[in-house]
Amino acid sequence: MDILQAIWLGILQGLTEFLPISSSAHLILMRFWFGWEIGDPQAELMFDVALHVGTLIAIVVYFWRDLTRIASAAFSKSPEHAVDKRLAWSIVVGCIPAAIVGALFENPVEEFFRSQYAMIAGLLIGVGLLMAVVDRLGRKERTLESIGIPEAFLIGVAQAFALIPGFSRSGITIVAGLMLGLQREAAARFSFLLATPITLGAAVWSFRKLFKEGIPSEMIAPMLAGSATAMVVGWLCIAFLLRYLRTRSLMPFVGYRVAIGLATLAKIFWGG
């Protein structure tokens, strides 16, 4: 992989990690569409982990004040910190389902789905249509501060499905939030806050395995370039989506998911 490919994939990761269109699906399908294969599946996973570290840094930088405030309230006994304390423990509980599923099934899922292009395309379309229905029918009345432990757990269960390429972590958690009556922006904000600890845990776990096996020297520069690009683009994308969802619907993302899914299916079955 050369630096330009790494930067392009970093841009793709930064955009698709936070927009509800599935970053893992795009990273896999981009290689399928353009033949950008590193050659070694382990090296591909290594590069993808580096990209996720870039978007993790983007979340931490963007939500630094919120994360600090929420974390400091976790064990507070002060009534004025009650809302942030509940939110802190809601985030902890919301991470449990994805952590369990990831620990048990991460490797089998990655090995199976990285070549299941038709299935990924189908999930892009199917989850996109579900997103359209929920976006239209959801009450969209509740704020971020109204989220409690039960709602967080349900959103966390939805997040566990994001291990499968095509679901989209932000997409499926925003859908779950809308089903629970959250406003669009509140659902997206909780989705991003929930992503921080689970992405950090996954990155630490993955890098622990990668460093044990060693990182090829030729992969270091592409990994750094891709990660830095994903960080910058991801930060901009978070800012855009939160502002966009204050007044607008998810329908453009639905249309995009369906279009990419159909185009992929067409390439598989008729494009050769």
Image: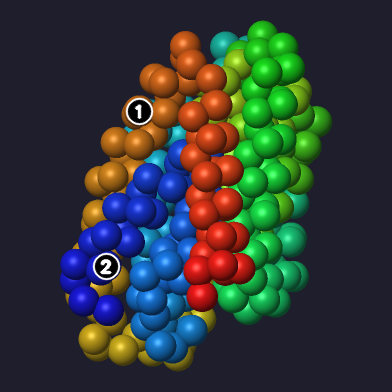
Tell me: residue 169, above or below residue 32.
above
Q: Nearer the viewer, residue 94 or 36?
A: 36
**Mark closer to the chain start, 2 or 1:** 2
Q: Which residue position holds label 1? A: 240
Q: Nearer the viewer, residue 180 or 66?
A: 180
Label ID, residue 45: none
User: Residue at point 59% right, 60% down?
Assistant: 265
Outermost residue on the front side: it is: 270
The structure residue drawn at horizontal position 48% and vertical position 84%, both measured from the top left corner, is: 41
- Return the residue found at the far right: 150
Dot 2 corresponds to which residue? 6
In percent of width and height, residue 160 lies at 70, 52
Amino acid at dot 2: Ala
In the image, residue 9 above or below residue 141? below
Report whether residue 202 is seen: no
Please, which colouring scheme is shown?
rainbow
